[in-house]
């Protein structure tokens, strides 16, 4: 083999080798996790370990300095990816196994794998209202964060001038107070004897708000509106920041050009600013919707027993009833629906700006 | 033409007003938290304004359970942030320094923990620990925190070092530096601000994490867990005092970071 072709093959080969090793290691880690879970995954372990061994032998045979240099990126990745495989991927697998498990007798402390599809039936029938509320509340909260976050990001990006960074900092400041304390503070604000309720009373708005289903019997706290308001509040920065990032990139001269060509201000806004801000709105929607759908703190602090979300139920089943299988089934359904929704959404909106 | 510009002006004013209200909305609870740290509540709940006092600020650590929970949180955050910053930065370095097959897949893999609901991450990890009979406590919480911090650090650092001029490293090596020396002398100091920023933010994430920690804590009580537990029984104003302290500390860190960063940049530009 002449030196040039040899160099070429070495230059292209090790990457594939490295990838093989990486994959084998990651899969090995997952397999290790699967083996921990005495379930159907145990059967796969041998095959994966074999793959890992083959990968290592492959590297040993190719060897050489160039190989090692080509392997550098994989070496840097390995520890972090291994950690994520062990403590993110493997747990997802054990969650799936758990969701199909059941206690074999009343004396069993711990459920074991038994293709127990009944857990999913329970999750989807008994907890249907919680699922519907979770996605409903999260969707409304996402919409509200767009309505509030877009003007905010717009003003910071286009009118902020030299105060841009300060304004942006102000948006992030709430991040630095505890999430729970912020939510508790909303409890103070919305309480029956609190300022908001009395303002509404004095303005005579209570009747209107009750007919809009925002208030309930003169109360603002412990209503669906309070829960949605809390979700909107807590995840608003996740909407503002990505929208700001995409607005910041817009060349203001584009809008000037449109106006020079006799576009109206609103047409220029609709046809130039909004389309260019869409990637930010898109990213923000995911960043708001996903945590909002899984949240249970807002429903706990600001809601009532009729406003519980799926997070409340998972938490209750898992930590109080110790009903791990049903809790896992609910978690899996939540994850599944969100993943499908994200995939459909990305298909519809495009993926280039996702990561 | 005049009608048009008036409409435009009205539109501008409307959008400015919404933005102002938005900022007010963001700050309202923060104001309430700070305000109620000066409250002298009569009952167990610090909900209704009763009167101004400095007592809470004079004895911020008098609620011993709360204080010890804060220490637990700080300890966990220090350890997990250190580990996650190292692991996450290595990933970011690998992804932005090298072009290699599979980087797309790694990117996707990294984003996954960030796009999974926390409750799924927390409950699934707890299931794994339960299966293995691992005792819940410091170790399980730290493992969980490192897990969600890695992705966060990796994504943040990668965004910060995008556009880094890697030929600088090449130049150092051409001048005879070993790869290691080139990295530590050239690359590392330049990417350090990005790494520190990511570390600071992920430290805040760890201290504030509730949902994932809730599932993996066992009987250990972190600061958010203490607040959650206390919220059913009593809410002492010291919670607000400690929260305000944390807020001031982190905002000053942020401001200091920005100022130092700007000065550095100006110095670099001056040279």
Image (cartoon, rainbow, N blue to C red):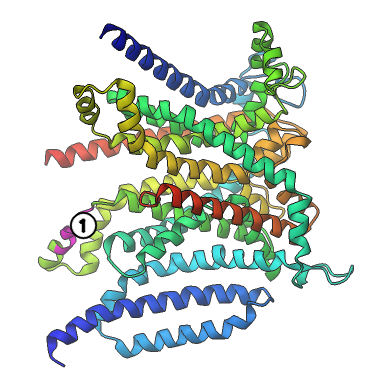
Q: Could you say which quadrant of the image residue A185 lies in?
A: top right
Name the residue: 73% across, 53% down.
Answer: A124
Specify the quadrant that holds the N terminus of chain A: bottom left
Position of B7 relative to A265 (above/below): above
Residue A35: % across, % down: 63, 77
Which residue is at a point 46% across and 36% down the rendered structure image?
Answer: A239
Residue B124 on image: x %, y %: 64, 60
The image quarter in which residue A163 lies: top left
Q: Nearer the viewer, residue B229 or A134?
A: A134
- Which residue is located at x 58 percent, y 68 percent? A90
Left or right: where does residue B260 sit relative to residue A227? Answer: left
The subunit carrying tag 1 is B
Q: Image height check: is A179 above or below A107? A: above
For mark 1, does the 10 Å Cα neighbourhood hold few (<14), some (14 to 19), or many (20 or more) residues?
some
Instruction: Work out whether residue A85 can be spotted.
Output: yes
| Residue underneath mark 1 | B186
Is residue A175 positioned above or below B26 on the image? below
Q: Is residue A171 left or right of residue B158?
A: right
Residue A264 relative to residue B227: left or right = left
In this rendered view, identify the residue nearer to me: A294 or A346: A346
Quarter holding residue B54: top right
Read off the magenta span: B164-170
Q: Is residue B60 visible?
A: no
Secondary structure of residue under mark 1: helix
Query: Which residue is rendered at x = 37% and y = 87% of the image?
Result: A58
For residue A278, above or below residue A10: above
Residue B192: give x, y in percent of width and height.
31, 51
A219 or B24: which is nearer to us?
A219
């Amino acid at each position: 083999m002449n030196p040039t072709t040899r160099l070429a093959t070495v230059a292209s080969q090790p990457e594939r080798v490295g990838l093989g090793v990486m994959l084998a290691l990651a899969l090995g880690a997952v397999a290790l996790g699967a083996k921990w879970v005495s379930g159907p995954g145990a059967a796969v372990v041998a095959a994966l370990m074999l793959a890992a061994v083959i990968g290592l032998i492959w590297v040993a045979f190719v060897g050489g300095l160039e190989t090692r240099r080509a392997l550098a990126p994989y070496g840097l990745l390995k520890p972090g990816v291994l950690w994520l495989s062990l403590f993110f991927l493997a747990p997802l697998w054990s969650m799936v196994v758990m969701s199909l498990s059941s206690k074999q007798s009343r004396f069993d402390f711990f459920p074991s794998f038994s293709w127990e599809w009944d857990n999913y039936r329970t999750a989807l029938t008994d907890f249907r209202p919680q699922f519907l509320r979770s996605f409903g509340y999260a969707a409304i909260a996402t919409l509200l964060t767009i309505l509030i976050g877009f003007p905010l990001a717009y003003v910071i990006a286009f009118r902020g001038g030299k105060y841009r960074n300060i304004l942006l900092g102000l948006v992030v400041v709430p991040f630095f107070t505890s999430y729970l304390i912020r939510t508790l503070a909303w409890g103070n604000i919305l309480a029956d004897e609190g300022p908001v309720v009395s303002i509404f009373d004095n303005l005579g708005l209570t009747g209107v708000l009750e007919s809009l289903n925002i208030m309930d019997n003169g109360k603002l706290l412990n209503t669906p509106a309070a829960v949605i308001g809390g979700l909107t509040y807590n995840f608003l920065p996740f909407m503002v920041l990505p929208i700001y990032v995409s607005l910041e990139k817009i060349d203001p001269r584009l809008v000037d050009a449109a106006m020079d060509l006799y576009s109206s201000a609103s047409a220029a806004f609709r046809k130039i600013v909004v389309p260019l801000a869409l990637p930010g709105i898109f990213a923000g929607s995911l960043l708001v919707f996903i945590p909002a759908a899984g949240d249970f703190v807002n429903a706990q602090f600001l809601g009532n027993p009729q406003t519980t979300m799926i997070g409340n139920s998972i938490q209750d089943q898992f930590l109080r009833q110790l009903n791990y299988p049903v809790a896992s089934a609910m978690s899996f359904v939540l994850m599944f629906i969100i993943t499908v929704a994200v995939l459909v959404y990305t298909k519809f909106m495009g993926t280039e700006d996702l990561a | 033409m005049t009608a048009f510009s008036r409409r435009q002006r009205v539109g501008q004013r409307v959008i400015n007003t919404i933005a102002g209200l938005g900022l007010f909305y963001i700050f309202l609870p923060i104001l309430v938290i700070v305000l109620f740290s000066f409250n002298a509540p009569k009952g167990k709940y610090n909900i209704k304004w009763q009167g101004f006092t400095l007592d809470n600020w004079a004895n911020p650590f008098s609620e011993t359970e709360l204080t010890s929970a804060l220490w637990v949180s700080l300890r966990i955050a220090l350890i997990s942030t250190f580990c996650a910053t190292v692991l996450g930065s290595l990933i970011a370095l690998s992804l932005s320094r090298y072009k290699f097959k599979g980087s797309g897949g790694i990117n996707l893999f990294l984003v996954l923990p960030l796009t999974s609901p926390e409750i799924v991450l927390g409950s699934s990890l707890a299931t794994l620990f339960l299966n293995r009979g691992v005792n819940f406590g410091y170790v399980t919480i730290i493992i969980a925190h490192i897990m969600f911090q890695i992705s966060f650090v990796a994504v943040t650092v990668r965004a910060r070092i995008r556009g880094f001029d890697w030929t600088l490293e090449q130049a150092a090596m051409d001048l005879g530096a070993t790869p290691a020396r080139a990295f530590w002398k050239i690359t590392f100091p330049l990417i350090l601000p990005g790494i520190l920023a990511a570390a600071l933010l992920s430290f805040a994430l760890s201290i504030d994490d509730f949902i994932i920690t809730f599932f993996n804590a066992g009987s250990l009580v972190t600061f958010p867990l203490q607040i959650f537990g206390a919220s059913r029984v009593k809410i002492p104003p010291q919670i607000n005092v400690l929260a305000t302290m944390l807020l001031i500390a982190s905002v000053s860190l942020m401001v200091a970071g920005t100022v130092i960063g700007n000065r550095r940049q100006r110095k670099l530009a001056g040279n």
